[in-house]
Image: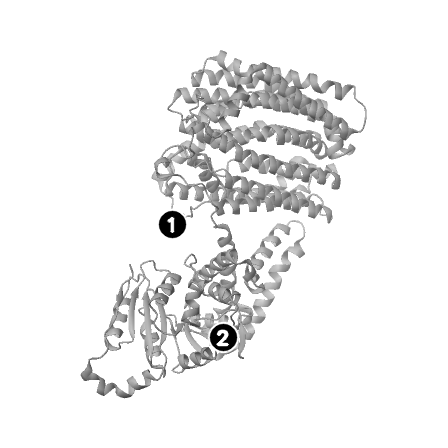
């Protein structure tokens, strides 16, 4: 509760000596002056002296102490003992909007005037304000805010804040004429109007005054600026303090823009746009150096002119701080604005108190899995559809060689990307939530990714010479920036997976796919060539990271950069083996790109990559969706053998059925798909598509152990199995390369089947699941593969007509064959899934529906 301290009116025997004073007060309407203050013992005395010295005597001065830790409250009480007009309110929340609303409720005056504690006003300030307000024409009145500097840096800051280069067309900083404005500082308002508007928005930590003025103008009232109303305002006295102040202003402006998008004006977007132009320049640097340098050159030129013009009124000691003051204001505001957008928290599902320690979704862990898979599936299907559409458009706009050189540049970036977090993101999913762990993981992600970026910049010529394509150098350097961007999003992504909140991840993935596809196509149309794909990829990564940070409440503490061994050691013990496994798996699953790019060239790599794209989008990415949900689920039930076995077998059966249906279907429809989606120029990708679709089918048979081993805390097993896989796959691909990309593709498929069977044998022994149960779980997939092949064969080999028509008939026949095969081979899969997704169902899966 807020505490109100008042001083009573003078005793009757004291009135005689105060006669003229009381007489002047009775002739004037009561005005309430509000002074929000927090730790203002240095400036508050000067502020109150200027207010109490007004020639308008009938005042109620409400000083709202925002939980100060210095002598602010004692100073107010001292003034209150000497002058009955001073009252003290205590705001335990400490925020300015809450202080203003507290004062609004206690105000007795007809007019409400705000004066901040580090400001002072001239003796006629209140009288002039009331004169304007009494006309009834204005909803608010304010004057010019003149910054006052004490230190040399403070004087430079005051000059920068009075410069149009520093603050744009902000009238209250440098206006010289009476005019209607959109915002007034330390405004004066009719008290009744302020109450009618509901006061100040307490959700805001900054920019609450601008937001209030915006609502006032939307209410049909006008704001008056009078330059004769001068406010002396103690500005920040050091450049770092100025930077933090404007960073807070930028965050506040982002919050207001979210509430009232129409309130944004060009001057508000100048600093964010400046930082955006600098980032764009960095992206263009490897390709168009002169154009990339343009935003930096223009700003430096403006900074030089503004400094020369503004510094004429400054002493030599203050002049040297002026450029830094301008830069701190612009970078602080711009950075704060983007941070404000990035920190916005999406609505996350709330758990009831009784359920906070267990499964996050009512209905058991199985229903949690279905909800997770549902959101991940939305992300997958919508996102991959966008990527597929963009790829098809780019295939018609760009030559295969353009795709090839970008694929070359992406090969090594892909390897580095999987270890930039040293596996700590996976460790966050495994261990209980703790702020110190989050901070440590974030620091490691940024440090390791930054190191990889530096290495990539230096090693780019070597990578280009490895592939025999010098033009890859600049592309490789540009793409290396994505390592740090993606690393910045690993921690929030892990936190969302840990809590099984997949809806925000879906939004982030869709945002990435949309940004990447839209920008790539737009740049390709304008003739950017392979750089269109690269810039689109970088833009997508940035959007993905920003949306993830927007979705989580976690923010690193100020001391997050201080590593603590106790909190970091368990993460590294779990994460480093996981990262090693991921690197090995990445090498296994991407060594084909290395071999094709090195031995067969960029154009062959383009055909091979496109042939891989559809199986990757339609099959492999679906399993990635399931694995994202499966890992946290397996980690939760690792102590319950029955639930672990049931969940593993059900997941294996479903994955194998889907992999068989989709893989055989893609292989049978490959000639029609390539012709319809990408054009006849890509005909060399047909055979790779056929073989790699079957490879994806075989791979689906062995994916279950990956998440199960990680979920039970045995990532070391994956390291050993990855080494075995690499030992088998690498020689097979080298032999296949002798027969071109067709040979490499079929070598992939031939190696995938026995390796998948080995994975299941190991899983049987480690998890304690009888091998016959695993084989029984795979039997329906064989029936589905046969059913799809038999259904699609007549369309592919006998039907004639336009390729789009043949493709439509082939896909319809394949779907019908898959459904019929499932119904005949294992109806339990369809029945269990149907019951599971229907609310209120009573199916009792071994995985554990309640």
Q: Which residue is mark 2?
A: 138
Front position in the image: 11 or 243: 11
Q: Position of residue 726 (x, y in %)?
A: 56, 23
Residue 538 visible, this orientation: yes
* Among the two numbered marks 2 and 1 on one chain, the one whose residue lies closer to the N terminus: 2
Q: Is residue 135 above or below residue 639?
A: below
SS type, badge 1: loop
Front position in the image: 780 or 734: 780
Q: How far apart in space, not on screen, are marks 2 and 1 (Cα)?
A: 48 Å
Residue 743 visible, this orientation: no
Q: State the image quarter where residue 391 is shown.
A: top right
Q: Is residue 100 above or below residue 839?
A: below
Quadrant assignment for the C terminus: top left
Q: State the image quarter where residue 239 is shown.
A: bottom left
Mark 2 neighbour density, 10 Å: few (under 14) some (14–19) many (20 or more) = some
Of circles 2 and 1, the one toward us is 2
Residue projecting furthest to the top: 772
């Amino acid at each position: 509760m807020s505490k109100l301290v008042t001083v009573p009116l003078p005793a009757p025997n004291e009135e005689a000596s105060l006669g003229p004073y009381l007489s002047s007060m009775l002739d004037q309407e009561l005005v309430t002056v509000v002074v929000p203050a927090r730790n203002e013992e240095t400036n508050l005395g000067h502020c109150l002296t200027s207010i109490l010295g007004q020639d308008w005597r009938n005042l109620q001065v409400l000083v709202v102490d925002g939980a100060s830790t210095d002598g602010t409250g004692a100073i107010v009480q001292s003034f209150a003992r000497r002058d009955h007009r001073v009252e003290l309110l205590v705001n335990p929340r400490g925020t300015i909007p809450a202080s203003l609303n507290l004062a609004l409720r206690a105000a007795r005056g007809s007019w409400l005037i705000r004066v901040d504690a580090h400001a002072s006003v001239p003796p006629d300030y209140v009288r002039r304000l009331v004169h304007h307000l009494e006309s009834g024409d204005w909803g608010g009145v304010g004057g010019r805010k003149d910054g006052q500097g004490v230190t040399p840096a403070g004087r430079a800051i005051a000059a920068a804040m009075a410069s149009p280069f520093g603050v744009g067309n902000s009238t209250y900083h440098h206006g010289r004429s009476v005019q209607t404005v959109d915002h007034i500082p330390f405004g004066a308002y009719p008290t009744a109007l302020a109450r009618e508007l509901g006061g100040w928005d307490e959700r805001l930590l900054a920019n609450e005054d601008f937001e209030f003025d915006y609502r006032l103008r939307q209410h049909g009232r006008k704001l008056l600026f009078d330059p004769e109303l001068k406010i002396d305002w103690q500005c920040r006295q050091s450049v770092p303090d100025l930077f933090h102040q404007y960073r807070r202003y930028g965050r506040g402006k982002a919050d207001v823009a979210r509430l009232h998008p129409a309130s944004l004006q060009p001057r508000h977007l100048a600093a964010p746009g400046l930082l955006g132009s600098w980032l764009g320049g960095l992206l263009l640097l490897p390709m168009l150096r002169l154009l990339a340098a343009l935003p930096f050159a223009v700003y430096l030129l403006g900074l030089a002119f503004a400094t020369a013009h503004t510094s004429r009124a400054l002493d030599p000691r203050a002049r040297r701080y002026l450029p830094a003051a301008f830069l701190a204001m612009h970078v602080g505001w711009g950075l704060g604005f983007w941070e404000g957008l990035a920190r916005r928290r999406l609505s996350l599902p709330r758990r009831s108190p009784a359920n906070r320690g267990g499964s996050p979704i009512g209905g058991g862990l199985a229903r949690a899995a279905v909800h997770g898979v549902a959101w991940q599936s939305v992300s997958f299907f919508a996102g991959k559809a966008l990527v597929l559409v963009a790829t098809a458009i780019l295939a018609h706009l760009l030559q295969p060689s353009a795709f090839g050189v970008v694929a070359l540049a992406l090969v090594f970036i892909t390897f580095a990307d999987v270890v930039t977090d040293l596996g700590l993101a996976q460790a966050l999913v495994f261990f209980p939530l703790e702020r110190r762990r989050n901070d440590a993981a974030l620091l490691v992600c940024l440090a390791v990714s930054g190191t990889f970026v530096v290495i990539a910049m230096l090693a780019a010529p070597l990578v280009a010479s490895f592939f025999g394509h010098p033009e890859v150098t600049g592309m490789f350097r540009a793409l290396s920036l994505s390592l740090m961007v993606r690393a910045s999003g690993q921690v929030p992504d892990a936190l969302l997976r840990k809590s099984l909140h997949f809806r925000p991840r879906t939004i982030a993935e869709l945002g990435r796919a949309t940004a990447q596809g839209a920008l790539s196509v737009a740049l390709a149309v304008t003739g950017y060539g392979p750089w269109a794909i690269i810039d689109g990829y970088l833009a997508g990564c940035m959007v993905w990271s920003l949306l993830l940070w927007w979705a989580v409440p976690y923010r690193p503490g100020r001391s997050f950069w201080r590593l603590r061994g106790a909190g970091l050691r368990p993460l590294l013990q779990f994460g480093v083996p996981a990262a090693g496994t991921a690197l090995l798996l990445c090498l296994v699953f991407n060594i084909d790109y290395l071999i094709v790019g090195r031995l067969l060239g960029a154009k062959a790599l383009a055909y091979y990559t496109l042939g891989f794209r559809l199986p990757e989008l339609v099959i492999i990415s679906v399993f990635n969706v399931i694995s994202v949900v499966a890992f946290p689920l397996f980690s939760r039930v690792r102590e319950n053998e029955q639930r672990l076995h049931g969940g593993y077998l059900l997941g294996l059966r479903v994955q194998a059925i889907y992999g068989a249906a989709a893989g055989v279907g893609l292989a049978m429809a490959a000639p029609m798909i390539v012709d319809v989606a990408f054009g006849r120029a890509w005909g060399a990708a047909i055979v790779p598509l056929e073989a790699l679709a079957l490879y994806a089918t075989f791979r689906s048979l062995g994916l279950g152990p990956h998440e199960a081993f990680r979920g039970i805390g045995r990532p070391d097993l994956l390291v050993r199995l990855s080494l075995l896989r690499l030992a088998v796959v690498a020689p097979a691909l080298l032999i296949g390369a002798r027969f071109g990309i067709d040979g490499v593709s079929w070598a992939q498929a031939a190696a995938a089947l026995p390796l998948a069977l080995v994975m299941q044998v190991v899983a049987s022994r480690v998890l304690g699941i009888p091998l016959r149960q695993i084989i029984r779980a795979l039997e329906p997939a064989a029936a589905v593969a046969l059913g799809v092949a038999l259904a699609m064969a007549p369309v592919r080999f006998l039907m004639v007509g336009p390729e789009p028509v043949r493709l439509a008939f082939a896909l319809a026949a394949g779907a019908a064959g898959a459904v019929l095969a499932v119904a005949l081979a294992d109806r339990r899969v369809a029945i269990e899934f149907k019951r599971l997704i229907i609310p209120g169902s009573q199916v009792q899966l071994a995985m554990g529906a309640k």
